[in-house]
Amino acid sequence: MGNSPSRNLEAQKREQSGITYFDRGTITGKDGRRYDRFAIQTHFVEVGEDQAELVRKYVLPLYQPGDVLAFGAKVMAMCTGNVRTKEQEKPGFWARLLSPHASETTAGIGMHDPYKLQLAIDMVGAPKVVFAAIASALTKPFGKKGVFYEIVGPGVAGIDGFYYRSSFERYHDLALINNTNAAELCDELEKKTGVPVVLMDANDIDQNQLGKGTRFPLTDAEIQDALADNPSGQGDELTPLILIRPLKEA
């Protein structure tokens, strides 16, 4: 496996056909297959933008036959309007009661925000969230992590936003929810652009694959290998589109 890509962005920065991207280097998978990865910089994508147009504008000028695209789940949520605002969320009894006692280790990142906790309750119900919070708190002294999300499920784990420390003010009052029809979205995107797509919710800890197109050529294990060091980087880099170029054996 390769190491985490250096965040010396100026050294990685490239421009081609008017597109700015960052060369994240070559990574070698467990099976010995190697991949080049290019993190493509976009503008800040707003709610309702056309995901196919993003691919046409930013990806096709760099695309070569055999390349595949990892499309960021948060940008897809913005494009499809799978978002909630604080105006739409009204923290109820359980959200107000539990949020002051939540922490990143007991109830998930950002769950100390009553709006985000209320969104979780809206998605899976108060009984499950309350049980998850209690179970997480009880198991914390024994060093067990991730109990909260094990119970509430990946939908809640995929919530992003309502985060006052975000470098983008837009996300202070907006939450994004991962799409549940990922494979369908990937197929539609490939049909419109000709680029095979996998939808990824990636961070420095996990490379969570939400779904891929029917004709996507890489296996799930190869996708994880190609993205193991999180080439998408941090959100403020505005690089939600990762062009993966499998290398032919010498």
Image (cartoon, rainbow, N blue to C red):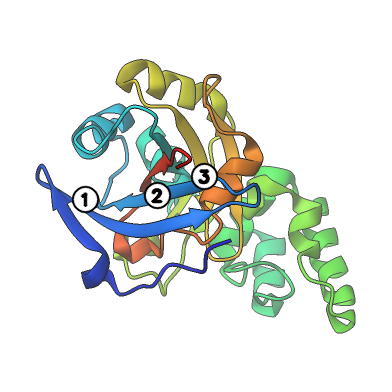
Residue closest to the far bottom: 141
Task: Categorize mark 3 by other alpha carbons within 10 Å: few (<14), some (14-19), many (20+).
Answer: many
Residues at marks 2 and 3, CA–CA distance in whole angstroms: 17 Å
Q: Are marks 1 and 3 in contact (CB under 8 Å)?
A: no
Residue 17 in the figure: left or right of residue 78: left
Name the side, left or right, on which 239 lies relative to 108: left
Residue 126 seen by the camera: no
Question: Which disc number belongs to residue 36?
Answer: 2
Where 10 sits versus 61, above or below? below
Left/right placement of residue 107 relative to residue 174 reads right
- Image quarter for residue 248? top left
First of labels 2, 1 by sequence position: 2
Residue beneath label 1, please?
43
Residue occupying image coordinates x 29% and y 32%: 64
Q: Is residue 140 above or below residue 114?
A: below
Q: Position of residue 247 (x, y in %)?
A: 43, 41
The quarter in which the N terminus is drawn is bottom right
Precedes in sequence: disc 1 or disc 3: 1
* Distance between the alpha carbons at the discs numbered 2 and 1: 23 Å
Give me the disc on residue 200: 3
**How far across and how far down the image is residue 55, in percent?**
28, 33
